[in-house]
Image: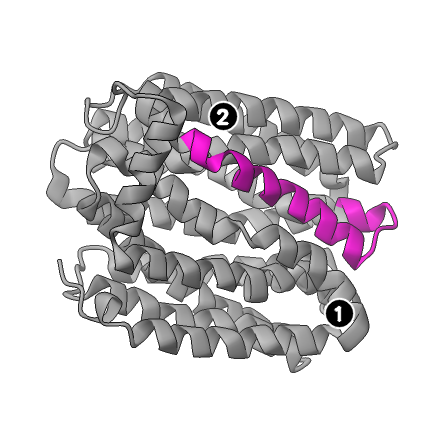
Amino acid sequence: MLGERDFRWFFVGYTTSLLGSSMAPVAVAFAVLGAGGGGSDLGWVMAARILPIVLVMLVGGVVADQLGSRRVMLAADVLRCAVQAVFAAVLMSGRAPLWAMVALVAVWGLGEGVFLPAFGALVPSLLRDGSRLSDANTLLGLARSVATVAGPATAGLVTAGSGPAAVLLIDAVTYGIGAVALARLRPSTRGSAGEGGSLLADLREGWSEFRSRPWLWITTAHMGLFNLLVWAPFLVLGPLTAQHALGGARGWGLVMGGYGAGAVLGGLLMLGRRPGRPLAVATVATFGWALPSAALAAGAPLVPVVAAALLAGGGSAVCGALYSTTMQSWVPAEVLARVSAFGGLGAFVLGPAGLAAAGPLADRVGAGAVLAFGALWQLGAGAVVLAVPAVRRRRW
């Protein structure tokens, strides 16, 4: 794949911007905690990033199908570059009230909301040989995994040494590099700009394509409830646990770095492989997502928590590569961005509620109870999804 000019440029730019964006959440979390915020404040800031994604994702899918994915992604990278530069400047000024952090993170989320559905539609248009799509998704997943390893670990060190503003400044530069790479692409017509009708008509068409595929909306519901009940509490309560029991920013950076290391190993395992029942394999991989929350709930020390994150990361890589390839293979290119937007909306829509509720709920029943419930839920939900014939029996 790297021998193809457009995919090579995109891979370099995307990998660079991923490195910065994987560093930023660590910096934001400890910027809030460093300003005297607690779990509830951290939850609101995290929710402020997810909520705009939910609000604009459907429109982003329509715009990407109409104007072309590359243009939409380029605009999103320019916006996110500017936002992170401003965020860094606000933190360096020494006056960063909670409302300012919420507002900046919300604009950051707007950029992500239009980028994500366009990304899913762009990748197939960068390849001349469609049979290599699975390996292309796996390679992009590996890039995400490497960034997840290097990003949080580096962010923890930089945050501890120079403060969160330095991390956000690095993130702004990486988004700029991503925008330059996107500007150089000349993708094929597949998945690029097309003629569209009204916004509502285009949305109705995308929704019709989405709901006509049971395997798609079932796995989307699974992901949405995972984000509400498992991942959101983990993201909010994990840093708090790390601050008190796992060594602070460095410890949390190692946990998230372990997750990324597992994802690298999972991606390497997937290269050149094409399981006969991709959705069944992807669903089995989601069982590992229960492990980090379970380890934190049990009060495990740093090493077992990192090991649990490692296994969860491996499952994430396998699941992500297979889900992306099945959607790009089984959904028509002319509606792919919109269908991706509905899938992304379903996955993200409950996230803000989970992020906002995790802190107050933990104050009532304890962080361990919230995390343990999430772990048990993930195991039960995965078993239910795997029992659905449309998921278990689906073949290429």
Q: Is residue 203 left or right of residue 98?
A: left
Question: Does residue 222 belong to the magenta stretch?
Answer: no
Query: What percent of the width, then of the height, locates residue 137?
Result: 28, 46
Query: What percent of the width, then of the height, locates residue 124?
Result: 22, 36
Identity of the residue drawn at 35% across and 71% down: 385
Range shown magenta: 31-60
| Real-space CA distance between mark 1 and mark 2, rounded to the nearest whole angstrom | 35 Å
Question: In which quadrant of the rendered view does residue 5 lie?
Answer: top left
Q: Nearer the viewer, residue 3 or 371?
A: 371
Question: Does residue 53 belong to the magenta stretch?
Answer: yes
Tell me if mark 1 has few (under 14), some (14-19) or many (20+) residues whose alpha carbon lies within 10 angstroms of its own. some
Q: Is residue 354 left or right of residue 273?
A: right
Residue bearing the label numbered 2: 76
Residue bearing the label numbered 1: 362
Position above or below: 155 against 199: below
Query: What percent of the width, then of the height, locates residue 281?
Result: 27, 68
From the image, which quarter does the C terminus lie in? bottom left
Identity of the residue drawn at 73% across and 40% down: 164
* Amino acid tagged 1: Ala
- Helix, strand or loop at mark 2: helix
- Helix, strand or loop at mark 1: helix
* Amino acid tagged 2: Ala
Q: Is residue 171 visible?
A: yes
Most extreme residue toward the bottom, as rendered?
Answer: 298
Q: Nearer the viewer, residue 207 or 263?
A: 207
Identity of the residue drawn at 60% across and 42% down: 51
Query: What percent of the width, then of the height, locates residue 185?
Result: 30, 20
Q: Is residue 311 left or right of residue 361?
A: left
